[in-house]
Amino acid sequence: MPHELMSHVPARSPEASDAAQRGDEILVHARHAFVEKGFDGASMQDLARAAGMSAGNFYRYFPSKAAIVEALIARDLAEIEEVFRGIMASPDPLSALKVGLRVQLDEHCGGEDLLWAEIAAAAARKPEVATILARMEEGIINRVATVLGRAGGLTGDEPSPRLLVHARLIFLIIHGAMTANVARAQPRDGELTELVMRTIERVIDDALAELKDH
């Protein structure tokens, strides 16, 4: 947060800090419950039980599963923001982006992949979940497009509309590869990872060439 804004932000009361910490703990338990039982299979009572709370007290924090998904996405977006701040601060943002994409392919597996596969499946049936998930995806796509723009010599912090389609394709490639691994329940395929990265390289080259042509 910019320094000049900090003085205008009131300090959290101890009660608010305790509530925020408890909310974070609930989200940890909710992640495990969703992975174990599935998004649809985990009832609000199951989630409350996993958090060691009564249903009534649980509803004070999260009135619905959609609210839990929204909170999970907010937490993940905060982490993504931190990652992209590091990428943009790098001497070579494009190389840093490629490293980050490879990490996604090589290391992000197991519970987290299963969780987001469950949420993505739920989004196909529940419009409120689809809306929340789409917001996260658009945030990631916009940040990828911004990095591509910086690599192509653009100086603004807003993504170029010309690069959004390339950024969306990169997102879909990564998302598809990760989802396929979850569905097969198999270890990462090194040859497939290399092919995915080469495909992404071609998409990036095409994006930068398009910037030069315009």
Image (cartoon, rainbow, N blue to C red):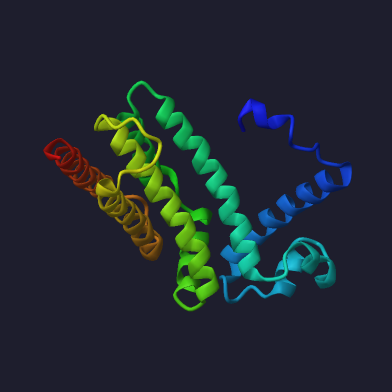
Give the residue at the far left of this rendering: 213
Query: Would you place residue 198 above or below residue 86 in this image?
Result: below
Instruction: Examine the image and state in which quarter residue 143 appears.
Output: top left
Nearer to me, 172 or 30: 172
Please identify the residue farthest to the top as the structure is shown. 91
| In the image, residue 10 above or below residue 185 | above
- Residue name at image x 56 percent, y 55 percent: 73
- Rendering quarter of residue 157: top left
Residue 148: name its quadrant: top left
- The image quadrant where one finds the C terminus is top left
For residue 197, side relative to residue 68 (left or right): left
Q: Is residue 209 left or right of residue 190?
A: left
Identity of the residue drawn at 39% across and 41% down: 158
- Left or right of residue 98: residue 72: right
Give the number of marks.
Answer: 0
Q: Position of residue 182 (x, y in %)?
A: 41, 60
Residue 3 visible here: yes
Of the pair 129 and 197, the residue shown nearer to us: 129
Residue 98: x %, y % from top left: 31, 36
Q: Quadrant of the N terminus?
A: top right
Q: As drawn, is 53 to the left or to the right of 73?
A: right
Residue 55: give x, y in percent of width and height. Answer: 81, 72
- Residue 197 locus on image (x, y percent): 25, 43
**Residue 114 in sight:** no
Residue at the limit of the structure toward the bottom, as seen here: 125
